């Protein structure tokens, strides 16, 4: 011990003040002292060290035991020694990491983990999962670098197989490859045999499956080397449906299929049933029959039959023509193109003598007249015929009624028995015959108005009408006229007209009349210009002859007025002479 301890001899008394100072110094020394073992002080007994003291030693020898925080250090070390992983067995209950190769059932391993089993019927490794976490995943293979996915190699006697992810940094698919693997059991990536793309497409011998299932065969030509299961919207109601075939889901593609003959049922056919997928659907049977025929059968009834002679029957198994339709009608969405010619085998020929008799026939034919004149070689004739009896008719029907009939050489419109070349019966008053000018829309209407009155009107409302008296009349009502003025000075112009007789150049007929060019200076309102041209290109002129009767009346009135004035003057002169006498 060093100062401040006080030396004393045996038997010397200690003063109280000295004793107190000695206790204070001793306490301060103990508080600041660190026990280092060896000669630096003696070990302390009991619990003399403060709980907050720091103890630093090079070696601790405990003859009885060593307890740290209520843990018996000797017992803890013994338990740890017994619980460590042993080559002869043991249980690991906490995390375990092996930084070197590990062999199980074998000597030093050349792999990170090598498991060898001597039992042929028991698996060397079993990985179990409770299924409560990670969806029951028992084993995860994963690469942490590079661009390729993880792979699992299976080794047969002579070949290795790889179960691996699709190649490439952005790849998402899965492959089974033949060959390949590590340096000991294979080499490289191997040859892909089965390829599952992300999304579900599965390819056999191809890494680019074109459908849900795509099987390739190297022995066939390109495009015919595959069987593809896909979907298409080309069939049915346009909804996606599963199809088997190549080339854009064209359907089932089979090269040279052969359906063999069934002697028991006398057929070589394919059956399709039940249509609609319901119990009441139809059963179709398509294929070859007896006598080299081919047919479609629906529930054991022949819907369509083709004989060896090429005749096709619908609704009959004994067609008597190239196409024989029985029990129903024939509908064609495109053009019907019959043969050309004027013989019973051409065009459209109806059955002969359908109601008995002899020589009755009806047909529609298109042909060229024999021995055509030069320039008429392309002129064709369309003939609709109903032959043999005088009462045979050709009818054009529309809107539920017979609209035009050809009977005994006469054409009837609105009548079933025309008795003149053209016989028209009006359906309603004022609905007769209308002749419309090309382009302008102007027309002339000829019709009975009712009560026996016939009219011939221009589209402007002008024209003639004929009551039952048989005379043509023209509208002359006051309400239809304006700017009405009496004609004056007509007589001199009427007397200037030159009535002539002449022969028409076109017919040679001798006629009476006037010359339009001579009338025009006198009465221009009665001269019109016709669309028809003369030989020199000038338009022809025409006259409203009916108006000359009005001129005659006006001229007579003027002539009468002149005579009345002269007679009145003569009478006045006579009266004056009588008075003078």
Image (spheres, rainbow, N blue to C red):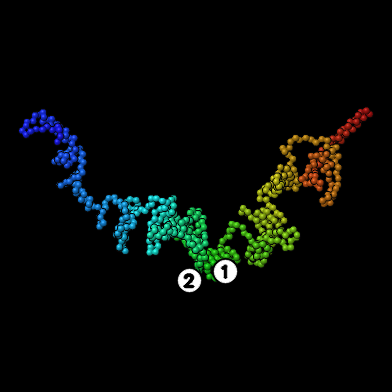
Residue 358 position, x and y percent, is 66, 67
Choose the circle earlier in sequence order: 2 or 1: 2
**Residue 376 in the image: x percent, y percent?**
73, 59
Image quadrant where one finds the C terminus: top right
Q: Which residue is mark 2?
A: 264
In the rendered structure, the answer to whether residue 520 lies left or right of residue 424 reads: right
Q: Nearer the viewer, residue 226 or 68?
A: 68
Please give left or right for residue 217 compared with residue 10 in the image. right
Compared to 321, does 126 lie above or below?
above
328, 359: nearer the viewer: 328
- Most extreme residue toward the bottom is 263
Any part of residue 200 in sight: no
Residue occupying the point 42% across, 57% down: 188
> Which residue is denoted by mark 1 in the rendering?
308
Name the residue located 71 percent from the left edge and 58 percent from the top edge: 379
**Residue 146 in view here:** yes
């Amino acid at each position: 011990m060093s100062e401040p301890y006080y030396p004393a001899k045996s038997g010397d008394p200690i003063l109280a003040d000295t004793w107190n100072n000695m206790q204070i110094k001793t306490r301060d020394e103990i508080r600041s002292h660190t026990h280092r073992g060896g000669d630096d002080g003696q070990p302390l007994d009991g619990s003399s060290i403060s709980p907050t003291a720091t103890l630093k030693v090079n070696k601790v020898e405990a003859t009885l035991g060593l307890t740290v925080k209520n843990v018996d250090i000797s017992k803890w070390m013994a338990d740890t020694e017994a619980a460590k992983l042993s080559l002869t067995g043991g249980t690991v209950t906490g995390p375990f990491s092996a930084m070197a190769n590990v062999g199980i059932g074998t000597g030093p391993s050349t792999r990170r983990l090598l498991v060898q089993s001597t039992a042929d019927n028991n698996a060397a490794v079993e990985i179990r999962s409770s299924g409560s976490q990670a969806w029951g995943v028992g084993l995860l293979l994963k690469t942490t670098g590079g661009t390729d996915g993880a792979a699992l190699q299976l080794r047969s006697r002579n070949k290795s197989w790889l179960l691996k992810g699709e190649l490439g940094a952005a790849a998402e698919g899965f492959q089974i490859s033949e060959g390949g693997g590590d340096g000991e059991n294979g080499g490289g990536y191997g040859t892909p045999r089965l390829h599952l793309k992300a999304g579900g497409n599965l390819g056999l011998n191809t890494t680019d499956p074109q459908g849900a299932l795509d099987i390739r065969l190297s022995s066939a030509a390109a495009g015919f080397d595959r069987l593809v299961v896909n979907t298409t919207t080309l069939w049915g109601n346009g909804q996606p449906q599963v199809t088997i075939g190549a080339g854009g889901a064209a359907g089932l593609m089979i090269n040279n299929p052969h359906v063999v003959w069934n002697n028991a049922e006398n057929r070589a056919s394919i059956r399709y049933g039940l249509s609609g997928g319901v119990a009441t659907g139809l059963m179709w049977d398509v294929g070859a029959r007896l006598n080299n025929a081919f047919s479609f059968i629906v529930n054991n009834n022949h819907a369509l039959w083709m004989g060896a002679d090429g005749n096709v029957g619908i609704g009959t198994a004994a067609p008597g023509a190239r196409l024989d339709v029985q029990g129903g009608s024939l509908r064609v969405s495109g053009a019907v193109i019959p043969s050309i010619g004027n013989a019973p085998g051409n065009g459209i020929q109806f059955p002969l003598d359908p109601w008995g008799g002899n020589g009755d026939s009806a047909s529609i034919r298109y042909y060229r007249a024999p021995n055509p004149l030069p320039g008429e070689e392309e002129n064709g004739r369309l003939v609709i015929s109903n032959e043999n009896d005088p009462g045979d008719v050709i009818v054009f029907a529309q809107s539920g009624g017979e609209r035009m009939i050809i009977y005994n050489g006469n054409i009837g419109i609105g009548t079933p028995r025309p008795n003149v070349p053209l016989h028209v019966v009006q359906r309603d008053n004022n609905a007769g015959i209308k002749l419309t000018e090309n382009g302008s829309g102007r027309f002339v209407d000829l019709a009975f108005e009712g009560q026996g009155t016939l009219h011939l009107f221009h589209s402007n409302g002008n024209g003639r009408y004929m009551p039952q008296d048989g005379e043509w009349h023209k509208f002359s009502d006051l309400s239809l006229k304006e700017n009405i003025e009496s004609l004056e000075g007509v007589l001199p112009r009427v007397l200037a007209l030159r009535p002539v007789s002449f022969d028409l150049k076109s017919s040679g007929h001798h006629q009476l009349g006037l010359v339009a060019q001579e009338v025009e200076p006198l009465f221009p309102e009665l001269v019109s210009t016709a669309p028809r041209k003369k030989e020199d290109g000038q338009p022809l002129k025409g006259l409203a002859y009916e108006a000359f009767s009005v001129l005659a009346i006006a001229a007579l009135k003027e002539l009468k007025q002149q005579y009345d004035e002269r007679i009145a003057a003569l009478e006045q002169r006579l009266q004056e002479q009588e008075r003078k006498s």
